[in-house]
Amino acid sequence: MIEVKMAQTLNAAPEKVWEVIGGFNALPDFHSLVKASELEEGGSVRKLTLTDGGILRERLLHFDEAKRTYSYNIEEAKGLTLPFRNYRSTFTLEGGPKPGTCTLRWRGTAELAPGAKPEDATGFIEAVYKGGFKGLVERFGAAS
Amino acid sequence: MNATQKFTASADAVWALVGRWDHFEEITGEVVRGCVLERRGRYRRLYFDDGVEIEEPLLEFDHARRTIAWGIGECRNFDPPIRPETFVARFTVRDAVPGKSCHLDIEWIYDLEPDREEEGEELLRDYFRICFDGTRKALGL
């Protein structure tokens, strides 16, 4: 199994950032690699159109507003070949090290697809997370 | 306040219906005329007769445990007997005979406005009936 864990501290209060990122359909608002998002199945599935034209369909597995966290998996990928399968990710926003800051933690686990190298899988996932962090840093600023 | 009813349908089938955050009118069509998601899916707005609107934040969702919970936010043209900031509604679907029958548990957590306790409790009891009857109808049972 592969695991990727990344975090980004932002120069904004958690409630302000959660207002932007907490909706399951919110990725296009801040993620540099996601062009569009459309909810399906009553809001529990999002169909993401990526900037390279690929399509991902992701299912919401768990959501907790009070803890500012949600988890999802990838149910389908079209127009791109994923180097992993059985991917599950958790996205959690916590208070940061100083007042008025917050830390977004993004963790993903998956199994390698047949013939794929671990670095291909971790590199793919890291690029996705970095794309999200990039948009948020541009919007809120990074904090240490 | 809690209530449970058994359905002769699989838990997956009932969850596919009651777990739909954006189509609450499917099971509450007796009173809810429309349902629209807002704030990128974090909230939904329910539309009732007489211009009444209720905004509801999604509080919890667990696909594996088949449970969904929400609260009450802004109310327009409606003065609820329930204190909105205290309200939590939670629906959970549990297997009875796997694949064949299940229980739908509905829980309301709330504080009522002073001197409106009777009105509030009657409203919530009626809402149990609306949700159970609506679910049964939507499943064709």
Image (cartoon, rainbow, N blue to C red):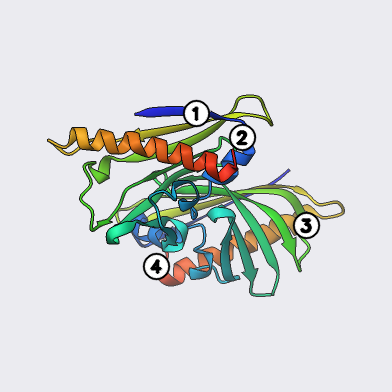
Mark 1 residue element? strand
Tell me which chain the residue with mark 3 is part of: A
As measured in the structure, the alpha-carbon distance from the residue carrying label 3 to the one carrying label 1 is 45 Å
As measured in the structure, the alpha-carbon distance from the residue carrying label 4 to the one carrying label 2 is 43 Å
B119 on left or right of A127:
left
Q: Is residue B70 visible?
A: yes
As measured in the structure, the alpha-carbon distance from the residue carrying label 1 to the one carrying label 2 is 12 Å
Mark 2 residue element? helix
Residue extending furthest toward the top: B97
Q: Which residue is mark 3?
A: A83
Residue type, mark 2 in image: Ala
Residue type, mark 3 in image: Pro
Q: Which residue is mark 1?
A: B5
Residues under numbered marks 4 and 2 in contact, where contact means CB atoms less than 8 Å apart: no
> Between residues B85 and B27, which one lies in front from this camera angle?
B27
In this rendering, which labeled residue sits more in front, label 3 or label 1? Answer: 1
Residues under numbered marks 3 and 2 in contact, where contact means CB atoms less than 8 Å apart: no
Image coordinates of residue A28 in percent, x first then y, are 53, 69
Mark 4 residue element? helix
Q: Which residue is mark 2?
A: B11
* Same chain shared by disc 1 and disc 2: yes
In this rendering, which labeled residue sits more in front, label 1 or label 2? Answer: 1
Tell me which chain the residue with mark 1 is part of: B
Within 10 angstroms of label 2, few (less than 14), some, or many (20 or more) residues? many
The residue under the point 59% across, 42% down is B139
Disc with the residue nearer the chain's start (1 vs 2): 1
> Between residues A73 and A133, which one lies in front from this camera angle?
A73
As measured in the structure, the alpha-carbon distance from the residue carrying label 3 to the one carrying label 2 is 34 Å
Q: Which mark is residue A140?
A: 4
